[in-house]
Image: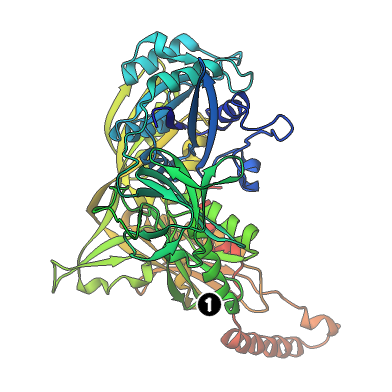
Amino acid sequence: MKNIRNFCIIAHIDHGKSTLADRLLQTTGTISDREMQDQALDDMDLERERGITIKSHAIQMDYTKDGEHYTLNLIDTPGHVDFSYEVSRSIAACEGALLIVDASQGIEAQTISNLYLALEHDLEIIPILNKMDLPGAMPDEVTDQIIELIGCDAEDIIRASGKTGLGVDDILTAIIEKVPAPKGDESAPLQAMIFDSVFNPFRGIIAYYRVKNGTIKKGQKIKFFNTGKTYDADEVGILKMDLQPRSEVKAGDVGYIISGIKKAAEVKVGDTITSLNNPCTNAIKGFEDVKPMVFAGIYPVDTEDYEELRYSMEKLQLNDSSLVFEPESSAALGFGFRCGFLGMLHMEIIQERLEREFNMTVITTVPNVSYHAFLERDPDNVVIVNNPSELPDPSSLERIEEPYIKAQVITKSEYVGQIMNLCIEKRGDLKNQVYLTQDRVEITFEMPMGEIVFDFYDRLKTVSRGYASFDYHPVGYKKSDLIKLDVLLNGEPVDALSALVHRSNAYELGKKICIKLKELIPRQQFEIPIQAAIGAKVIARETIKALRKDVTAKCYGGDITRKRKLLEKQKAGKKRMRQVGKVEIPQEAFLAVLKLND
């Protein structure tokens, strides 16, 4: 066990984690040059297309130094704030972390938050200055930032380049020398923590775990601590580029288990595996349950596909345990699911994966957050409102509270003005402003989560020309003056388009939504009024004009009364059509609210 090292790679998005992982795999001979491709560990098409890591990937490497043979278990993690749950799970299975900082961009918001996650778990941090081969690299400046952040010496920082392979040997040496070997007792009762799981259509669910104590053997009877279910360990082994079966996996190592589990609900990430004959007394303290931030409805385009959508979501949840969902129904869209996501990118990725991996075409409603409503007759009892249609009658409400977050924005000093304007427009409250260096500023805000859900991230990138980085965490609920904004089409309320908004924004938002829907909804044979209303009061209106047919074309000259008679006849027909006609709403209209500023 003294020759095992478990470590993960943490960094901000696009700082070169996956490229550096590729070089480590090549240097240790884990992957041959013939099999080598960029982002070798990212096995999803979506990850390659977007150039981002969505899932953590675990892999074992063998390395020999000074005649000693070492086993290195690497977990490559995502960098985007929406996938920070993946990072927290990976950190729980490791003793060390490579903190990678881009030499041309310096420290970003996500670097700091991932670092704090690692320090909470007492991980040994190895700082690495990546992308040293770039002409825009500023090694001395960024070295100062790292020293200030983690308080190490300048010589501890390894200068490397994932592209050219510079410094890779130094990194491997540092991992062996600095990362502590795992602690554990091979003779103790089996205790292993599940940190990830994937679904294989032929073999059922494959769980990835880290053995803390004891040994897991092939064919042994095992038990899942939290669910209490028992299984046979049909196959155990270690994770290389492919799964490699072994007869046993010992304490300190990372491996996989296949035991013919078919139901997604039976494998919980964070659960403890133990043996049935000699069980351990307590579960490993895993990591906290995921707290979804953004809620949206996902509905099948064809209502008959509801069961198939449920099946797809369960399979997807195995691969992405931060997805939470429950059934709900909507008057406009029929049966579907109310899903909780960690952020907007997470929502986009889930929607795309449903379409690609399961061929499910879905309609997504406008995302929102969950609110707490308190009733006058029972002020101690909280009503959780996930959907604007669930809001109790305003006359019976004592108050509504909405979730607030603490947001950290790191940016160049020239963009501070525009970013402050944006945050104040989003009802943000400036808490702190720190100059990290002469031209890099960290601004801390408290703002409502609901304001971030729409277009905050896109606009932040626009006003800072892509330079600002953004990270946030929840700080609880605060009282707010919120009202329900309904959208009516042809006099009928469309529940999928209603939203809870702050009173001060309601009029402006109502007007914008009506204008946007007017562009997106196709014209019909009859006139369609689009109205935004608060309660019974209409605050904005746009009208989609009817498609006209020139019924008077056949009247050449002649008496005006003949023309009028024809027009009256047409008017009566349109009126009747409007009473029975239904307005078709295209998919883009449901997400129109997100792009109001385009």
Identify the residue at horizontal 26%, vertical 71% (top origin).
Answer: 394
Identify the residue at horizontal 57%, vertical 87% (top origin).
Answer: 579
The count of marks equals 1
Q: Is residue 540 visible?
A: no
Vertical position of residue 128 compared to residue 587: above or below: above
Indicate the secondary structure of the residue bearing disc 1.
loop
Q: Is residue 171 left or right of residue 372?
A: right
Amino acid on which the number 1 mark rests in the picture: Asn
Q: Is residue 96 left or right of residue 161?
A: left
Q: Nearer the viewer, residue 4 or 131?
A: 4
Q: Nearer the viewer, residue 488 or 128?
A: 128
Vertical position of residue 295 compared to residue 327: above or below: above
Vertical position of residue 305 compared to residue 564: above or below: above
Q: Nearer the viewer, residue 66 or 561?
A: 66
Q: Position of residue 456 (x, y in %)?
A: 44, 44
Residue under numbered circle 1? 490
Q: Position of residue 25 (x, y in %)?
A: 59, 29
- Quarter of the image with the N terminus is top left
Q: Position of residue 460 (x, y in %)?
A: 46, 37
Identify the residue at horizontal 22%, vertical 52% (top origin).
Answer: 478
Q: Is residue 181 visible?
A: yes
For label 1, the crowd category at 10 Å Cα-Cα, with few meaning under 14, some 14 to 19 and many 20 or more, is many
Q: Position of residue 96 (x, y in %)?
A: 39, 29
